[in-house]
Amino acid sequence: MRVIAFATLGVLLALASPRVAAAQEAAFLAIPTYATLENPSASGYGRSVLNKTLSAGMTKFAMPALTHEDVRYVPRGDGSVFSRVAYAASRSIVTRTRDGRSTFNISEVGGSFAAVGLSNIYYSPADRTMSGTLSRWGTQVMWDTVGNELKEFWPDIHRRLRPR
């Protein structure tokens, strides 16, 4: 039963996150065609789903294949809370190569930038500015960093929440 509940939660989060991203862009970039939490827009939601899909494809598949990076997040699991937060955040900038050496995370930084650059194809000309593109890139990297933090601390949270 727990597996079904967890899978259902994952599906709900996957469907909700583009809506939140669309509302965030509407608020910070003042793009009137984007969805807000109060006023959903199919085009804003669709763009957010496409952004998320394009970014995942570039950062988890295309760029790692070219750069030979291992972009899987490996939780640290021990140490102080601060050191674990710093470690999780650093994984957006630093990753491992397939042979285990630390390297600049071209897959995350460059892959996100490539995805955002490609996404300009389906944004209106008014939204294809350098500041808009850089803002969307920063947002992509920020959400990936938040995901790393959740991956780092979820085992601890799960342990505390589960009934004994």
Image (cartoon, helix red, strand yellow):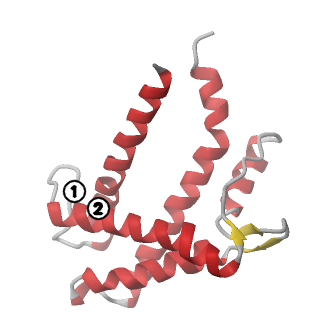
Residue 153: x and y, percent? 65, 40
Identify the image quadrant of residue 59: bottom right
Rate crowding at label 2 as few (under 14), some (14 to 19) or many (20 or more) other CA atoms within 10 Å.
many
Disc 2 target residue = 22
Q: Looking at this view, name the residue that lies furthest to the front.
A: 65
**Cα gap from disc 1 to disc 2, whole angstroms:** 7 Å
Above or below, 3 relative to 149? above
Which comes sooner in the sequence, label 1 or label 2?
2
* Amino acid type, label 2: Ala
Q: Are marks 1 and 2 in contact (CB under 8 Å)?
A: yes
Residue 86: x and y, percent? 73, 55
Residue 36, label in figure: 1
In the rendered structure, the answer to whether residue 124 lies left or right of residue 63 reads: left
Per the image, label 2 sits on a secondary structure element best described as helix
Q: Nearer the viewer, residue 161 or 8?
A: 8
Per the image, label 1 sits on a secondary structure element best described as loop
Rate crowding at label 1 as few (under 14), some (14 to 19) or many (20 or more) other CA atoms within 10 Å.
many
* Amino acid type, label 1: Thr
Residue 122: x and y, percent? 25, 81
Q: Looking at this view, name the residue that lies furthest to the top.
A: 164
Identify the image quadrant of residue 26: bottom left
Residue 83: x and y, percent? 78, 49
> Which residue sits at x=31%, y=62%?
49
Residue 126, label in figure: none
Q: Nearer the viewer, residue 13 or 138?
A: 13
